[in-house]
Amino acid sequence: MKPIQVGLLGIGTVGSGTFEVLRRNQAEIERRAGRGIAITMVADLDVARAQSIVGPDVQVVNDARAVIANSEIDIVIELIGGYGIAKALVLEAIAAGKHVVTANKALLAVHGTEIFAAAHAKGVMVAFEAAVAGGIPIIKALREGLTANRIEWVAGIINGTTNFILSEMRDKGLDFDVVLKEAQRLGYAEQLGYRIKLLGITKRTAQGVELRVHPCLIPAKRLIANVEGAMNAVLVQGDAVGSTLYYGKGAGSEPTASAVIADLVDITRLHTADPLHRVPHLAFQPDAMSDLQVLPMSEVVTSYYLRLRVADEAGVLARVTGLLAEAGISIDAVLQREADQVGGEGATSTDLIILTHSTREGEMNAVLADMQALPSVLAPIVRIRKEELN
Amino acid sequence: MKPIQVGLLGIGTVGSGTFEVLRRNQAEIERRAGRGIAITMVADLDVARAQSIVGPDVQVVNDARAVIANSEIDIVIELIGGYGIAKALVLEAIAAGKHVVTANKALLAVHGTEIFAAAHAKGVMVAFEAAVAGGIPIIKALREGLTANRIEWVAGIINGTTNFILSEMRDKGLDFDVVLKEAQRLGYAEQLGYRIKLLGITKRTAQGVELRVHPCLIPAKRLIANVEGAMNAVLVQGDAVGSTLYYGKGAGSEPTASAVIADLVDITRLHTADPLHRVPHLAFQPDAMSDLQVLPMSEVVTSYYLRLRVADEAGVLARVTGLLAEAGISIDAVLQREADQVGGEGATSTDLIILTHSTREGEMNAVLADMQALPSVLAPIVRIRKEELN
């Protein structure tokens, strides 16, 4: 059987990785897919550089529309990025009856609904494993491997300390030294058995769906708390399977290419299936989607780590915890540092660490405003959300 | 469209979990699959108990062959276990043109080749996600998610300390107290930055394929070293994606049911595809399988942790390390305990811990025989294989 013909739009880091892995593992992939898969045409603005990557046997053009117009091409891979020209080209490829593979999370986040509807109407597939968590086959796990489950929540590590520090710097306008000092103070949280990770979280509740990304304290004993460096991990809670976790490189040329090629093979396989029986783009059939409300952050329910720099004087703890009690927020643990252990700022102030039980964020915001107004509270209160992930 | 009709052979723990999850998440699953999936007939020797589980609307028989003979049934789930009657029934179901889902790892380990050949000849699918690592979608990840990769090795945690203790008891005929003492002595290894896990390992080498299951020291900083209790995890090394890890419950009623139902949905989806384009049973097309040699254990290359109970006298370390040097086995680390720290057995003996670099197991076996024969070596040498997993 003739190899399935693939056109590549944009041959940067991921594109050249895809070309290289397809070439290196050509025999292995054909033995799996039952059919050859060949990139036969590439569009890139830098034609000379692209030609040097793919060699003389592959046609290189500087006009992406020439790839889409080529009737020999079965699948178009979009690796241009962004949601300007990329959106137009994906929609044109769909209109031309091409299946599409994309690693473009921005495009799908902003225009996914329109793109998937166009693909459904035309009877083609838009595959996007590479757009989420790089080489980890998390879309396949969620859409197929866990298909028996009501997914209750998903928590993903996008990065570790680095992203936390970067996000603190951005959100608070702090410089690196200040943020590093705060990260070191989080040693308090590690005494208490927690680690900090930057998590993306979605959770299904009776009131709607939580969608949030923020630094988060999680129990050190959870496997996901031990994910370090640039590695990604996604923890999924299903009602039947319980917790499952998927871990791997979240970026990079060949890890992302691994996901792009998995999509190429899936399309090679499924394009012969009745379109109604293909894996639906968003896990559910287009006529069976729910339109769940996204909860405002004030409605999100979590527990909290609070760090207050307070005057070292009688009654402070009672005033602070009194405010929590009035709001009905119960306390899990309190840690008050000896004043002389704080150092560097004299013995007139100390750190007070409070771990709370779960509460609505709106309630916590109101209490924090009252706490911050106490004369004994000497500096901006640090508040970090805490998730047990069980 | 009429629901796809499923017949269930054996309604024990996994069977009742499958029935319950299919019933509870019926709407969710149909919204995903695009078609209803219904268990309409059950065979079990205990008809009354089976009928009490599935209720009056499902036909229960005590003869599995009545399910296979029912022309309305599209898919047969085999949950009987073992490889006696289960093998006959699976082959009969295939011969009757039914697709088969099984959680039976023993059956596939022993008769997989025959069963997959029969299914291929008949053009039906045999799906077995539930036979490997319970609810973790590892077969899907290996066959589809990582399809772009040459898989270099796979290491799976089947269980933690419990299985190590059990296997020591079984292999060495030791009683629990002795084994527990050895497990505590492994504290030496944890000082050195390792943890012990019972691993199943397969590795592709230029000489053939390693296939082995044994307790193993792995670096504590690897994510898989932090998998505890009854959880399973599978670490896969692919040439493009690098390391990916899959973690979840390896057993239990609903976690295993999650995998069984994922297979039902896959079959519902793929039975409309050209049979040549379905996911091949063993990841590669039947006419494109390699017949790789399984290496004998003596050819396996690993590093080692050795613990020797030796006489506390001059020259012992030189004699022991001399034997390793003569065999060309280089040493990574040596830890000699002070004699008075060992305790309980007087000050005339001590523990000598050696970590080696990689060597062929045959070489190590020969050196260990010579070491064991040294008069200064007072007890059976403890030898544990060590894997860096990077």
Image: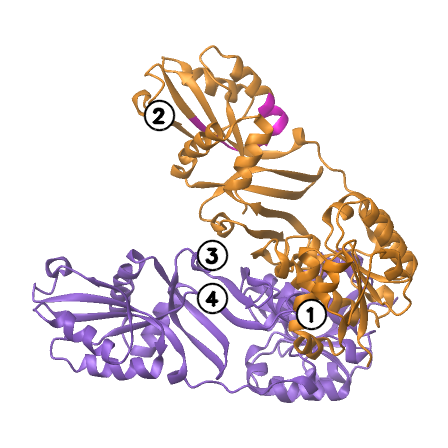
Chain colours: A purple, B orange
Mark 1 residue element: helix
Residue type for callout 1: Leu
Identify the chain of the residue marked 4, using the numbered disc in the image. Answer: A
Location of residue B217 in the rendering, given as x and y in whole percent from the top left corner: 50, 38
Q: Within 10 angstroms of label 2, few (less than 14), some, or many (20 or more) residues?
A: some
Residue A312 is a magenta residue = no
Of B43 and A390, the residue lying toward us? B43
Q: CA distance from mark 1 to mark 4?
A: 31 Å
In space, the residues marked 4 and 2 are separated at their CA atoms by 41 Å
Which is more foreground, mark 1 or mark 4? 1
Disc 4 marks a residue whose amino acid type is Ile
Q: Are marks 1 and 4 on the same chain?
A: no
Q: Residue furthest top?
A: B375
Mark 1 vs mark 2, CA separation in Å: 58 Å
Of tags 1 and 2, which is closer to the observer?
Answer: 1
- Left or right: B73 with respect to B156? right
- Discs 3/1, front: 1
Q: Report the chain holding disc 1.
A: B
Residue behind mark 1: B22
Tag 4 residue: A157
Please tell me if label 3 and label 1 are on a single chain.
Answer: no
Q: Measure how far apart labels 3 and 1 are at the Cα level.
A: 29 Å
* Circle 2 chain: B
**Which contiguous range is marked in magenta?**
B353-365
On screen, residue A317 versus residue A240, left or right, reads left
Q: Position of residue A154 (x, y in %)?
A: 52, 70
Per the model, the C-alpha gap separating discs 2 and 3 is: 33 Å
Front residue of this view, candidates B10 and A45:
B10
